[in-house]
Amino acid sequence: MKAALCHAFGPVEQLRIEDIPEPIPGPGELLIAVHAAGVNFPDGLMIRGEYQVKPPTPFTPGSEIAGTVAAIGPNVDGFAPGDRVVALCGMGGFAERAIAQADRAIKLPPAMPFDEAAGFLLAHGTSLHALADKARLRAGETLLVLGAAGGVGLAAVELGAAMDATVIAACSSPEKCALARQHGAADTIDYSQTDLKAELKRRYPAGIDVAYDPVGGPFTEAAVRALAWGGRLLVVGFAAGDIPKLPLNLLLLKEAQAIGVFWGAFTSREPDHHRRNVELLFRWFAEGKLKPHVGARFPLTQTADAILHVMERKAQGKVVVEP
Ligand SMILES: NC(=O)c1ccc[n+]([C@@H]2O[C@H](COP(=O)([O-])OP(=O)(O)OC[C@H]3O[C@@H](n4cnc5c(N)ncnc54)[C@H](OP(=O)(O)O)[C@@H]3O)[C@@H](O)[C@H]2O)c1
């Protein structure tokens, strides 16, 4: 079978497509014929050797897949060959077939296409966990989403709207602002054109209840300064590269909170809660409240281009590789 292989940590461009033996599922595992694999920011960091997980080389990146069950290992219940599933596989996703733990696989609703499913779980799972479990976002509150047209950002926009919050989308181009509006943002700020801190102060003098931050860099402090009394900052990621440092008096003055979000660890530590969240996401998808946006599709031969598309800030919604 064909798979993308990283032989040594370094530039994403060095990823190679090669023929490798098809993996055999062990106890508790499924072999999945991959129809689509979601591209996520950490895929590129992992290839560069800049991610907290540094797998032994060679390895195949790709942590999120949608496809059909091709074979079932020993001690697996509840799956049959041909089942349509979405799975978190850790690694190995950018390939024609991939292994996933059966307990990390979930059957897909019939109406959900593979390309939408491949990028759904991580982006929407992270954002639901952040907004509902960590920030306890309430109907009628204001929600500021940074990087609002990116993978997790656009999911947060949709979910905020589904939870009846007033969503303010902040992103870096008119096209990205328009996409965020299509997905439920009531207001947008293009922070490539305006100063985010000044613009938030001007438009929202009473402050913002919740700020969702997958970007970091200079935007974090601007968002914290815009928080209302009792506001919550959700620390989701640092796509801009710099991990910001905050003057803590900004939290004290407003009884505000900065809350860390680590969805991957949450899914392992609280699997039942995670499954309930996924059920809710599938229900909202079936009700039409969530419309995952696949902004770009790449064949397996162009996996490096797909990852670079995300790393170079070009992605709108999710990017998928379709083996
Ligand atoms: N904590 C968790 O559990 C968790 C889960 C999933 C993802 N994450 C993290 O969340 C972050 C976003 O992930 P994603 O998959 O949504 O990525 P993404 O689709 O690339 O979105 C990131 C957004 O960040 C903004 N950005 C600003 N400066 C950037 C730069 N120098 N390079 C790239 N993007 C830049 C871009 O929006 P503008 O152009 O509009 O500024 C971009 O749309 C990543 O750091 C990821 O590791 C965390």
Image (tube, rainbow, N blue to C red):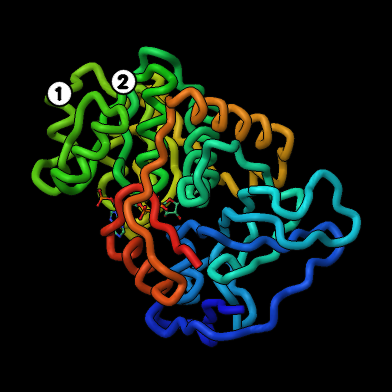
> Secondary structure under badge 2?
strand
The answer to whether residue 161 is above or below residue 216 is: above
Q: CA distance from mark 2 to mark 1?
A: 13 Å
- The kind of residue on which mark 2 rests is Thr
Q: Which residue is mark 1?
A: 203
Of residues 150 and 254, which is closer to you in this image?
150
- The kind of residue on which mark 1 rests is Arg
323 horizontally vs 108: left or right = left
Q: Position of residue 246 (x, y in %)?
A: 36, 44
Please tell me in which quadrant of the rendered image residue 167 appears: top left
What crowding class fits label 1: few (fewer than 14 Cα within 10 Å), some (14-19), or many (20 or more)?
few
Q: Position of residue 195 (x, y in %)?
A: 12, 41
Of residues 20 and 257, which is closer to you in this image?
20
Question: Is the residue marked 2 within 8 Å of ligand 1, measured from its CB?
Answer: no
What crowding class fits label 2: few (fewer than 14 Cα within 10 Å), some (14-19), or many (20 or more)?
many
Label number found at residue 166: 2
Q: Position of residue 311 (x, y in %)?
A: 34, 64
Label number found at residue 315: none
